[in-house]
Amino acid sequence: MEVTIVGAGLVGCLLACFLARRGHQVTLYERRPDPRERRAGDAGRSINLALSERGLDALRRLRLDDRVRAAALPMAGRMMHAQDGGLSFQPYSAGGAHAINSIGRAALNRELLEAATALPGVRVRFGHRLTGLDERRGTLAFDPGGGEARARVVIGADGARSAVRARLQRLPGVSFSQDYLDYGYKELSIPALRGQFALDPGALHIWPRGRSMMIALPNPDRSFTCTLFWPHDTLAALDTPHKVRAYFAEHYPDAFELMPGLVAGYRDNPVGHLVTVRCSPWHVTTPAATVGLIGDAAHAIVPFYGQGANCGFEDCVELERCLDRTGDDFPRALELFERRRADTDVIARLALDNFVEMRDRVGSRAFLAGKRVEHALERVLPGYRSRYELVSFTTTPYAEVERRVARQRRWAAAAGLGAATAAVSGLVALVRARADG
């Protein structure tokens, strides 16, 4: 089967690998030039990614996980930066057994593009911007000068502003919504300090400040990519070098001392938008063609659970399962794939909830006490897992994560585990009995 994928970003390239392995002929169309031929990546335009188990599971199926991990740095927890410069480390799991992996989007895209183009049957057409799609005729039009192409199967992997989805939105029966946060993001950088990391490279660094926050993720060149998540009015208010320096000196004093390029980065790097996208259905089928959506084109989420790329990679695994079940009948497989919306709706909600947690709660005593209780339960109850662990370090479906966490909370409440951590060990037997039941 010949399959056309619109978008040669992370999900498009990974999907091409899965489909080519199944023997399909795949053509990828990408509006941008070949990123492998550009000297600079997307500096200032792309949030560093936190690759975790769902993404690694997809890569592992293609034997790409070791290759990608070589360009990533593990982060075993959050390092919280108080306004007075105090530091506190919060491991993601009891004993620090698990880590998420920091990797630049551009570096990961290049790795996946190399993997896709190395496979027989995969072609990539760069500089092709989709300008027209007619599912009734099975045709696609591209600019500049890209002409027209025909396709029986078209899959839009072209992101939150998907041109493929824009066509589907005009069809009867297709619903669409996009919800913007009143926040923007801007990238900055902390360079290496005397050839070494200026901060601990084994942590995701967070500066929570109530209504706003800054995070920093390590890079292999020993720099950190910092991202501001601020209300738009705050971002706009710092309109002079003096205001930028004064604000950072007051709110991020320890980081301010490590950012020699602060003013230029703040001035030159664009403000990105944070949006949640929902669409239904994710596919249409006519006698001439089947058109489907995957990744952010179908269900873009905000980045506060680190699950955007991981969720998109898991989409590829789920679509392959659907193809297995239907014997590579794409119309039927894409119809089955629509059931995944139950999971993507959940992670969209969790990502929004986690924003409030990261910017506002992670430094509070109540939050820290709750984390200590969770980790204590994880140590003494092998089956007990926190929501964060289930999302980031397992492939448990997102909707099942929500149900399981609700069950665990009922068990804990029934066992009286809302008390201090010291009470945990005495209640283990009771909780275990309820969990088994």
Image: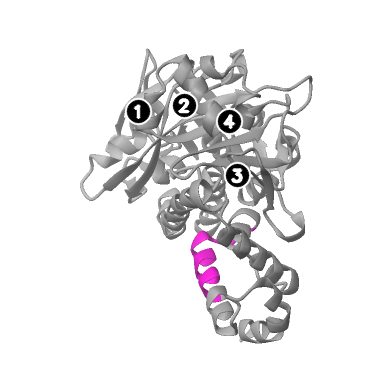
Residue tagged 3 = 22
Query: Magenta stretch: dominant SS?
Result: helix
Marked residue nearer the N-terminal end (1 or 3): 3
Q: Are the two marked residues, 2 and 1, in contact with CB atoms closer than 8 angstroms? A: yes
Marked residue nearer the N-terminal end (2 or 1): 2
**Label 3 SS:** loop
| CA distance for labels 1 and 3 | 24 Å
Crowd around label 3: few <14 · some 14–19 · many ≥20 (10 Å)? some
Question: Mark 2 belongs to which amino acid?
Answer: Tyr
Frontmost of labels 4 and 3 is 4
Q: Nearer the viewer, residue 375 or 162?
A: 375
| CA distance for labels 4 and 3 | 39 Å
- In reply to whether residue 180 is colored magenta, the answer given is no
Identity of the residue drawn at 39% across and 31% down? 234
Marked residue nearer the N-terminal end (2 or 4): 2
Identity of the residue drawn at 70% across and 58% down? 93
Query: Residue 226's mark?
Result: 4
**Label 1 SS:** strand
| CA distance for labels 2 and 4 | 31 Å
**Residue range (magenta):** 394-407
| Residue 395 in view, yes or no | no
Q: Position of residue 9 (x, y in %)?
A: 52, 31
Residue tagged 1 = 140
Marked residue nearer the N-terminal end (2 or 3): 3
| CA distance for labels 2 and 1 | 10 Å
Query: Residue 29's mark?
Result: 2
| Residue 183 in view, yes or no | yes
Question: Mark 3 belongs to which amino acid?
Answer: Arg
Identity of the residue drawn at 61% across and 18% down? 36
**Label 4 SS:** strand
Frontmost of labels 2 and 4 is 4
